[in-house]
Amino acid sequence: MPSFEKCLVTGGAGFIGSNLADELIRSGREVRIVDNFSTGFRENLEEIDGSFDFVEGDLNDETVLSKAVEGIEAIFHQAALPSVPRSVEDPVGTHEACASATLRLLTKAKDAGVRRFVYAASSSAYGDQPVLPKVETMAPDPLSPYAAAKLMGEHYCSVFYRIYGLETVSLRYFNVFGPRQNPSSMYSGVISRFIDALMKGGAPVIFGDGEQSRDFTYIANVVNANIRAAEIADGFGETYNAANGERTTLNQLLEVLKRITDRADAAADHQPPRKGDVLHSQADNSKAVEVLGYKNLVGLEEGLRNTIEWWKNSRFADDVR
Ligand code: UD1
């Protein structure tokens, strides 16, 4: 089984990137992180246990790219401007951060002789197809600029394997949650926002009737999928759903969180549905299970409890302490 020592995590100051860097360091790899702090935080870097190289800058900058990939065997490309609504506001910025930066990084990786390239793709590629669960053989149908830009990156990954032999693997993440997910932005993921609101005694906002559903996936499962993707011996140029294969509505999610946080009193603040929102999302994860050995290491409720514990000790809890 091919293994790797020297790896680059792009977006390593972000939620997924910093958790991934932690695990790579824990398993004895040499880690370099590149981040421009557009949505990442220095606090996440400070929480990483162990030493790593750090390059600050944007992946669309040639000098930054050169420094970032030098001597690297495997790249975990997590850097992006995540968020469907942000992309509706700023489609060009989203394209540059998600699609152009990916193409530049792939090109630099090929030229520098990097062997493996694991790409953070998005379940938003499936759009609102009525068939559930969503399986990789379905034709993509992006509904937002974010989904389109992320899908573009996937296509480039596939092409770079076919033409240049760069060993790319695309992981379509399905609503990843867990410690270090920033709850403080209007673009933040729903679980981080629900937890923040409940813990602060506020009312969680639900866009629409709350009957939309997602395949919420705990961070440890996605980190493990990334490491497996860097170790597989074939299956390159392909896409894999990275998710548990279960579906939870926002109303169900809120009930579980109200119970865990002791906020039975909390009532949702319903607001109009968001533009570009997908109604239902659930993965068929059998390809990832079979090829990557994907495992549901941590389920929804345990993951929510871990995330709440992290929140209690995080800077986000400061104003209620
Ligand atoms: C989408 C992608 C996901 C991607 C993520 C990046 C899909 C199915 N998923 O997530 O792959 O990684 O973008 O940001 O397209 N909501 C509320 N209240 C809130 C916040 C959100 O009700 O305070 C609702 C949203 O309207 C949505 C759901 O919760 O219906 C999930 O939203 P969010 O957590 O932002 O993720 P997606 O847009 O599903």
Image (cartoon, grey):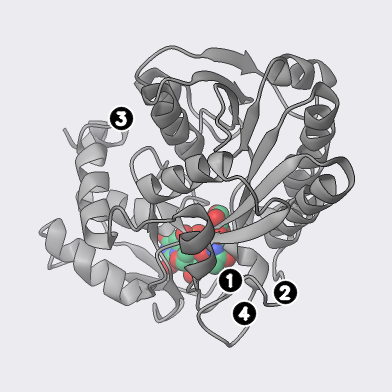
Q: Residue 257 vs residue 150: left or right? A: left
Q: Nearer the viewer, residue 15 or 121?
A: 121
Q: Residue 62 vs residue 199: left or right? A: right
| Label 4 element class | loop
Q: Which residue is mark 2?
A: 141
How many numbered discs, if any? Answer: 4
> Disc 2, disc 1: CB below 8 Å?
no
| Label 2 element class | loop
Counting from the top left corner in percent of width and height, residue 156 is at 81, 50
Res. 165 image quadrant: top right
The mark lying in front, picked from 2 and 1, is 2
Mark 1: which amino acid?
Answer: Asp
The mark lying in front, picked from 3 and 4, is 4
Q: Residues within 10 Å of mark 1 (few under 14, many from 20)?
A: some
Could you tell me which quadrant the C terminus lies in?
top left
Mark 4: which amino acid?
Answer: Asp
Distance in Å between CA atoms under marks 3 and 4? 36 Å
Mark 3: which amino acid?
Answer: Arg
Name the residue rendered at 70%, 71% in the picture: 143
Point out the tag, 3 or 1, that comes first from the N-terminus. Answer: 1
Q: Is residue 242 visible?
A: no
User: What is the number of the mark on residue 277?
Assistant: 1
Counting from the top left corner in percent of width and height, residue 234 is at 65, 50
Name the residue rendered at 29%, 69% in the picture: 253
Distance in Å between CA atoms under marks 2 and 1? 13 Å
Point out the tag, 3 or 2, that comes first from the N-terminus. Answer: 2
Point out the tag, 3 or 4, that comes first from the N-terminus. Answer: 4
